[in-house]
Image: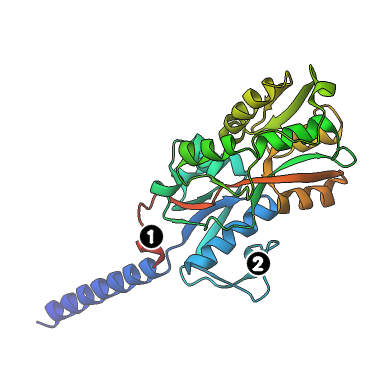
Amino acid sequence: MKKITAIILAAVLILTSAIAFAGCSSTSKTLTIAIPNDTTNEARALLLLDQLGYIKLKDGAGIAATPKDIAENPKNIEFKEVEAAQVPNAKQDVDYAVINSNYAIEAGLNPVKDSLGIEGSASAYGNILVVKEGREKEPKLLALKAALESQKVVDFINKKYDGSVVSVVANPTDGYNSSIDYNAIKGEKITIAASPTPHAEILAVVKDILKEKDITLDIKEYTDYVQPNNVVNSGELDANYFQHLPYLEDFNAENGTKLVSIATIHVEPLGLYGGKQTTVDALK
């Protein structure tokens, strides 16, 4: 009888330990979120997660925030820092991913419909037209600016992207700048670096506008965030269109480049997307 009782007690202890262990592991499970690894987009991703209520950043943490600035992380989130263009590819290996809209669109995602949380369209991260310092008043670059700020471009963005990309041009032009002598720049070529989506697509509209004035727009596509700035700073290309101002300012500070923004065209809201998790339930 004593032997049977001992066996039963042992079984109960094993079962109790197993239940306790299971409970412990479920509450301490680490959630993984892939975020861009460049300074400004990493901070932007953390600010989005703070806005959504999944983490809490320290007071004063702003556009230079890093995971070290997290004050509260109740779901024990582990952050995987990935080059921005590669975050969509990393999505399948993590629970969630915070992705720039241009890369989300390229990966076949609809930021409005597929994201589990998204920045507002009033984001401070407007995508800009950039030239080398000292070239801001060149007639052909002002012609490019006017075409990019045109109503045709605004209409194209609104129709093509349906909220996934948002125009921020307050006073659209007819595509041209009345102060420019277009006859004087007739036959000229403008070279511009751009990411494929949405920038090169938007620039295709600009190309047609400039063609009406016999100006050629040569669009060079890049898939990274470094070379487009380097080729403009070196003078190899005239301009670029792929980044937001906080990124440009950080790039100039780190690399000693002399690049300036001459127009802000659109916002690409940053979004939170599911990876292994398909809902935000695990974050609640």
Q: Residue at x 83, y 32 (%)?
A: 139
Query: Is residue 275 shown to the viewer in this render?
Result: no
Q: Which residue is mark 2?
A: 68
Q: Residue at x 72, y 54 (%)?
A: 246
Q: Residues within 10 Å of mark 1 (few under 14, many from 20)?
A: some
Closer to the camera in the image, 212 or 119: 212
User: First in sequence: mark 1 or mark 2?
Assistant: 2
Left or right, residue 119 beside residue 223: left
Q: Secondary structure at mark 1?
A: loop
Direction front: furthest residue: 178
Q: Identity of the amino acid at label 1?
A: Val
Closer to the camera in the image, 107 or 102: 102
Q: Kindly indicate whether the residue at mark 2 contacts the one at mark 1 (C-beta within 8 angstroms).
A: no
Q: Residue at x 70, y 62 (%)?
A: 64
Q: Secondary structure at mark 2?
A: helix
As drawn, 138 above or below 118: above
Left or right, residue 189 beside residue 75: right
Direction left: furthest residue: 1
As drawn, 145 above or below 115: above
Q: Which residue is mark 1?
A: 280
Query: Is residue 182 shown to the viewer in this render?
Result: yes
The image quadrant where one finds the N terminus is bottom left
* Residue 121: percent from left, percent from top: 54, 55
Closer to the camera in the image, 232 or 88: 232
Q: Residue at x 68, y 20 (%)?
A: 211
Q: Identity of the amino acid at label 2?
A: Lys
Q: Residues within 10 Å of mark 2 (few under 14, many from 20)?
A: few
